[in-house]
Image (cartoon, grey):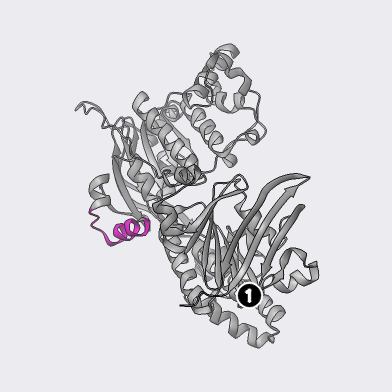
Amino acid sequence: MTAPPMLLEVSDLRVAFAGQEVVHGIDFSIRSGEKLALVGESGSGKTVSALSLLRLVHNAQVSGRALLRGKDLLAMTERQLRGVRGDEVAVVFQEPMSALNPLYTVGDQIREVLQLKKGLTARQAVAASHELLASTGIPEPARRANAFPHQLSGGQRQRAMIAMALASAPKLLLADEPTTALDVTLRVQILDLLADLQRQHGMAVLLITHDLNLVRRFADRVAVMERGHLVEQGEVADVFARPEHPYTRKLLASKPQRDVAEPLVRGDEAPVLKSQGLRVSYPVGLPGFKGWFRKGEFVAVQGADMQIAPGRTLGVIGESGSGKSTLALAALGLLPHQGHLQIDGTDWAQAKKAGRERALRQRIQVVFQDPFSSLSPRLTVEQIVGEGLQVHNPGLSVAQRRQRVVAALADVGLVDDPEHGSDWLQRYPHEFSGGQRQRLAIARALIVDPQLLVLDEPTSALDVTVQKQVLSLLQRLQRERGLSYLLITHDVDVIHAMAHDVMVMKDGVVVEQGPVDRVLRAPEHPYTRALVQAAA
């Protein structure tokens, strides 16, 4: 069987900023109709390498050669490149909400490509945009074409981005982390969609990702990048079965590992968290004149019963919109609710009435999904981590508070020697890596000695190797301190690594719950089975 013709040949690609080289002479190639995955952690250079081929990286000095069907992209003028971008090579970006223009409907944005690149009339572009949206599986494409990006779900926005990229029938699609912002089932749907469209149109795909499960499921070949160097490439099955480079082996070994101890059970211990018939709802506007006189109701959590014993982890899993984050906010006392919700035997409603809300908040703390957003950029490490002590232990002196802050930094592995930990105190969050910032967030939560931590997607913004480190830290802290965790996530691997019990939510309702081994190995509800199969 004759091999497909070579579509793109990249040789000695180098990218520098202000004279500092970040991509060091890499070589790779893609044949027509082939799927190549460019893999590596954040900062490895994979996105810069791919986007530099079209000179889409601001202030980058690019050298080398990139032959697209015999024409060197890196030798083209800006005018020549305009004919290539979106026409022969299209891009699907990581975050569609940022990539799509919020002022125009998705149909307008697709039609613009069709009219500019294909020369269609306005009427022809309307019909073609509906066909493209329909080909990506969006229901009611004619109606969705008139929607603005914020009116679509995350999966629908990503499908609209793909439709826009396919509008000019490109020969090569650059997909830059196209599923990172999506739930696990949506990730599978988008990958299957890309594979179907790739076969239908005969285009090649360069997938940029750090998710090895996606690579195994989607790509024909894989190229691994580390700090701007291409360290290994080959057929996916060969590289995954027999990785040669230590960095590739490190990535493949980064799947979260279960290291959870079963706490001793004492019959007289009250649950750290307990809810019965928990219900959370929001007022919403009603259509027409009815909305002038009264509000409707959207029920985000309906009748949730749960409890967490000391030293145990309850994992709550579900897609976006399932109600799991609303459940977490209610547990933190940040949302009004109906039903009973107790922290260490004390009901939130009673604590607020009695003026004991602050004491209850000391017992339950939170670690958010994105440490860069949750840490104030204006405060130093000492101010961020020590803030809780000022509220809950105001009697401490400055020296005592500083000593507690350094000890907390040592607990989370940021400081090796507490004697010299003061060197870290005057730094700001932007001076740390993503994993270090998440450790800071954990230290901030732990410093007031809580009994329960709410972990809201604590590792979803991190690379696989850093994710494994943070999960290992949380496992160690639970064993040493007897902490209880309410773990909110859409990642089945994280649930398996961390949780004793699991609760599955869909559309605000708990559809299944029980011990993690039983629920994940023999799920009873069809939705749970779909989640587990999508993560396999």
Q: Position of residue 215 (x, y in %)?
A: 46, 58
Direction from residue 501 to residue 397 in the image, left or right: right
Residue depicted at x 74% and y 63% = 74
* Rendered image quadrant of residue 373: top right
Residue depicted at x 28% and y 33% = 309
Q: Position of residue 428 (x, y in %)?
A: 65, 31
Q: Which residues are magenta?
A: 522-535
Direction from residue 52 to residue 502 in the image, left or right: left
Q: What secondary structure is found at the residue carrying circle 1?
A: helix
Is 418 contained in the magenta span? no
Vertical order, 302 against 405 (above or below): below
Q: Which residue is mark 1?
A: 110
The number of callouts visible is 1
Query: What amino acid is labelled 1 in the image?
Result: Ile
Q: Position of residue 153 (x, y in %)?
A: 50, 63
Vertical order, 342 against 220 (above or below): above
Is 534 contained in the magenta span? yes
Tell which of 329 and 385 is nearer to you: 385
Vertical order, 143 against 504 (above or below): below
Whether residue 337 is visible? no
* Rendered image quadrant of residue 66: bottom right
Whether residue 487 is visible? yes
Tell which of 422 and 76 is nearer to you: 76
Q: Position of residue 503 (x, y in %)?
A: 31, 48
Residue depicted at x 57% and y 17% = 402
Q: For the C terminus, which image quadrant? A: bottom left
Prevailing secondary structure of the magenta residues = helix
Tell which of 175 and 1 is nearer to you: 1
Which residue reaches farthest front? Answer: 1
Q: For the N terminus, which image quadrant? A: bottom left
Direction from residue 503 to residue 284 in the image, left or right: right
